[in-house]
Image (cartoon, rainbow, N blue to C red):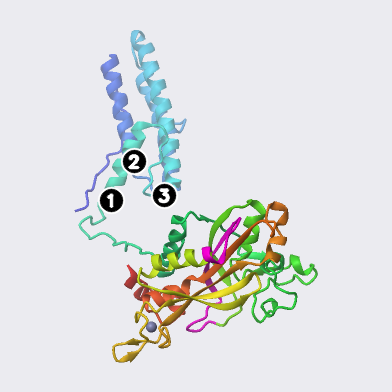
């Protein structure tokens, strides 16, 4: 039910009692009437009429109060009535101005003009407006979000290495040719430097090659950037987004996520690499997985290897019941990452910061987070991760 308040326009009464209490009471009635009228104002023109009614020099209510109360007051009460009407005048002026300020404010925000009485009046008006809202209607349901499967995998991998004492390092997604290729020992004509594979920023032709900007194709530039800033020993894990010039399909995306690791110290050996990654794989995929290293090649590691784990879907048998296991192509092994001992040529670029290749050694590894998430959650299309379809994503909630 909508409450309707009928406002009777205020007229200035003649005073018969000029005692302080009586004048105060009359002044209170003036302010109350003013508040009621202010609450009805809904437009600029209504406010102007309201202002003139109360403040016009000729016959405005303030002028009337002056005439009807002060001038008619007996001599002995003049001082008291004069003080009261002056105070009232100030209060009325503030209220009238306040009503204008409120008119410009959004409907459901109370403008705190500093005048308590006015604020109370406006609150009253606001509540009256709210009578039209049905508070018995059910509220708006706000769905609770869940961690994206790629981000969950990302966090799990990072946390395994953090527990081993690794720090998290990050770097820019828009990178220079120097950090993305040159300092990582990519030869000048390496195919990865071709626009077929790498997304370059436009308009860079006038710059020397090493300064040209591109979207980083791996998180490895952060290895160089971190070694420039921090002296050995160093243990870092580097999560981040990377880009390649690949058309999107079920197993490729022009944007994907990588996590790399780098450990540098004196006397780091391939045995340290194997032990660390074997531990990490067991922490990620379960203590029963076995690891297997196969020789490979990367420009920035020597020797290099690919790490395989026993298929965590079929347990290494290559079969799921009567069906062949597709994720491991029935081999019982799944390739999870690339790794190797840091190539001494890479250390040469940061030699001045304590990375003398004759004194320190290290290992590095890198893995695709999205691919591991695909395997882990049995998803067969990488595009599903980036389409933002709630029907897909809510399965991971
Ligand atoms: Zn399998």
How far apart marks 3 and 1 lie (CA) works out to 14 Å
Tell me if the residue at label 2 has its CB under 8 Å from ligand 1. Answer: no
Q: Position of residue 152 (x, y in %)?
A: 40, 65
The answer to whether residue 177 is seen in the rendering is: yes
- 352 and 98: which is toward the camera: 352
Q: SS of the residue at dot 3?
A: loop
> Is residue 71 at all visible to an observer of this figure?
no
User: Which residue carries the number 3 mark?
Assistant: 106
Q: How far from the left and from the top, in percent, is residue 112? A: 40, 37
User: Which comes before the other along the chain, label 3 or label 1?
Assistant: 3
Around disc 1, counting alpha carbons within 10 Å, would you say few (fewer than 14), some (14 to 19), or many (20 or more)? few
User: In the orientation shown, which residue stands out farthest toward the top?
Assistant: 76
- Residue sitting at x 34%, y 45%: 40
Residue 249 part of the magenta segment: yes
Please say if 209 is above or below 16: below
Q: Which residue is disc 1 drawn over?
A: 130
| Range covered by the magenta-colored residues | 248-272
Secondary element at tag 2: helix
Q: Residues under labels 2 and 1: Cα distance?
A: 12 Å
Q: Is residue 334 above or below residue 107?
A: below
Identify the residue at horizontal 56%, vertical 83% (top origin). Answer: 247
């Amino acid at each position: 039910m909508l409450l309707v308040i009928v406002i009777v326009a205020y007229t200035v009464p003649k005073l018969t009692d000029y005692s302080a209490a009586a004048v105060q009471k009359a002044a209170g009635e003036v302010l109350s009437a003013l508040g009621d009228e202010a609450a009805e104002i809904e437009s600029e023109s209504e406010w102007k009429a309201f202002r003139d009614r109360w403040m016009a020099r000729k016959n405005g209510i303030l002028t009337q109060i002056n005439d009807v109360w002060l001038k008619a007051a007996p001599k002995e009460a003049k001082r008291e009535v004069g003080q009261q009407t002056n105070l009232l005048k100030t209060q009325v002026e503030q209220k009238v101005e306040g009503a204008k300020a409120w008119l410009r404010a959004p409907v459901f925000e109370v403008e705190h003009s500093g005048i308590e009485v006015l604020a109370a009046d406006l609150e009253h008006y606001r509540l009256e407006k709210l009578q039209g809202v049905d508070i018995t209607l059910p509220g708006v349901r706000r769905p609770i979000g869940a961690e994206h499967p790629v981000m969950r995998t990302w966090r799990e991998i990072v946390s395994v290495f953090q527990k081993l004492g690794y720090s998290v390092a990050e770097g820019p997604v828009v990178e220079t040719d120097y950090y993305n290729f040159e300092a990582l020992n990519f030869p000048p004509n390496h195919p990865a430097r071709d626009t077929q594979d790498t997304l370059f920023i436009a308009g860079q032709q006038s710059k020397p090659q090493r300064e040209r900007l591109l979207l980083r194709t791996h998180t490895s530039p952060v290895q160089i950037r971190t070694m420039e800033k921090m002296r050995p020993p160093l243990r870092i894990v580097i999560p981040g987004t990377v880009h390649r010039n690949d058309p999107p399909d079920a197993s490729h995306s022009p944007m994907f996520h990588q996590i790399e690791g780098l450990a540098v110290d004196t006397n780091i050996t391939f045995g340290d690499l194997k032990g660390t990654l074997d531990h990490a794989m067991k922490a990620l995929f379960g203590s029963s997985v076995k690891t297997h290293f196969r020789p490979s090649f990367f420009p920035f590691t020597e020797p290099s290897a690919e790490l395989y784990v026993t298929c965590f879907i079929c347990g290494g048998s290559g079969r799921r019941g009567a069906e062949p296991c597709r994720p491991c192509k029935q081999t019982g092994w799944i390739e999870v990452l690339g790794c190797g001992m840091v190539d001494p040529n890479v250390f040469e670029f940061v030699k001045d910061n304590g990375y003398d290749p004759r004194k320190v050694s290290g290992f590095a590894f890198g893995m695709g987070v999205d691919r591991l998430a695909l395997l882990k959650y049995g998803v067969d299309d990488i595009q599903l991760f980036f389409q933002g379809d709630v029907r897909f994503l809510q399965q991971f909630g």
